[in-house]
Image: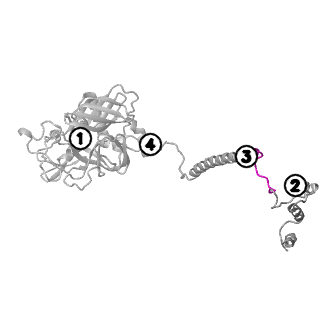
Amino acid sequence: MADQQQSDPAPSWWSRPAGTAEAATTAAQPGTEADPATASEVQEPGAAEQRYDPWADAPLHVTDQGKASTGRGVRLRHVLALCLGTALLAGGVGGWLGVLAERQSSTRLELPQAAVEGKGRAPESVAGIAATALPGVVTLHVRGSGGGGTGTGFVLDPQGHILTNNHVVADAKDITVTFSSGESVTAALVGRDSGYDLAVVKVEGVRGLQPLALGNSENVKVGDPVVAIGAPFDLSNTVTAGIISATGRPITAGGDKGDGSDISYVDALQTDAPINPGNSGGPLLDAKARVIGINSAIRGADKQDSEKQSGSIGLGFAIPVNQGKRVAEELIRTGHATHPVIGVTLDMEYTGDGARVAAKGEDGKPAVTPDGPGARAGIQGGDVITKVDGRRVHGGDELIIKIRGHRPGDPLALTVVRDGRERTLELVLGSANGS
């Protein structure tokens, strides 16, 4: 029974491949000799009929021993290197393109701007006037016993004469002149006059001087445009603009010495062009860049009120150029200036309207100089002078200012009140040496 069970064929559900059962049975029976042809057919590798037999001595697959894989490994490394190089190249190109794109993007974001234009300006414009005048304007740095200071001046002639204010150089020991080009040279005092607040200095060895053209202050009208050039607070070549606010404005300046010897009397041009300390002596120019005045004084805020503006408040005063021209010519020629006089002593304490002739002069001398211009015209002590050439005067200072606006030898008409009656007297101005 047992033997019978061992010889039974395999069940039909067995998963052995067809065609191999016989060979396996035969090989399993002792003493059975396998057919050489069959064995050769089954064992020969690469045969077309060969199939995988899990019960065979060795599986059908072949293990890789590493002999046939050398070329394939080299090719793989080349591919990897090529891929790495390509990635690096792509990264570099991408970065460069990014920078280029950023630059192009920045260029596109530039704001619109006007193109560069010609720098020329119309001659009558403020810029045109400044361009014409600046080469002839100078800054003065002065050192004296009381310290240093800054002022302005302008060139009068090719010989190097420069006009400025007396109060700029009054106590000077050393004077340095700086031109708009930046060149600096030492200057010498030629002459000065405190009554007119004018002075002339001179430079030597300077080439290419550009004197400013002189206008005529008689042509000036209220409302005319003007340009002022100076060095306010030592800011050289400062240009401001405004208009003529008034003409014939009587002002006095100075008086620091207390004896009246340094008081200047000016029948001034008033302007609203900003003028500050350091502008003194600078030119006031008309629309044709001609000098019509010499900037001399400003009306500042009251010193008692600290809340008020301490700089320019739009009240600047300039000496008319006609007066400046005459005084400059005399200072260059003789070192001194002459003053027109009427030969009377005024009562400066008089508070009424007009200028009253004193009853007595200094040291008991007559108030009306004997054989002087006033005496010859018939002026008497106690007369009140109310008009000069038909223009009202309201005090002694104003009378002096109106007289100083003329030259010695000029004819003058004075309206006087005597014993309640008004009369007009004709006289010719005399001359006195200034200080």
Using the image, tell me which numbered label, if any, was put on residue 303. none
Q: Earlier in the sequence, mark 1 or mark 3?
A: 3
Q: What residue sits right under mark 2 in the picture? A: 43
Is residue 220 positioned above or below 15 on the image? above
Q: Nearer the viewer, mark 1 or mark 3?
A: 3
* Image spot of residue 289 (x, y percent): 40, 41
Whether residue 35 appears in magenta in the rendering, the answer is no
Amino acid marked by disc 2: Gln
Is residue 413 visible in the rendered image? The answer is no
| Image quadrant where one finds the C terminus | top left
Q: What residue sits right under mark 3 in the picture? A: 73
Residue at far bottom of view: 1
Amino acid marked by disc 3: Gly
Residue at far left of view: 364
- Mark-to-mark CA distance, 4 and 2: 117 Å
Q: Secondary structure at mark 4?
A: helix
Using the image, tell me which numbered label, if any, was put on residue 128. 4
Q: Nearer the viewer, mark 4 or mark 1?
A: 4
- Mark-to-mark CA distance, 1 and 3: 116 Å
Number of numbered tags placed on the structure image: 4
Is residue 127 visible in the rendered image? The answer is yes
Q: Nearer the viewer, mark 1 or mark 2?
A: 2
Whether residue 59 appears in magenta in the rendering, the answer is yes
- Magenta residues span 58-74
- Tags 1 and 2 touching, CB below 8 Å: no
Amino acid marked by disc 4: Gly
Q: Secondary structure at mark 2?
A: helix
Circle 3 packing at 10 Å, graded few (<14), some (14-19), many (20+), is few
Q: Earlier in the sequence, mark 3 or mark 2?
A: 2
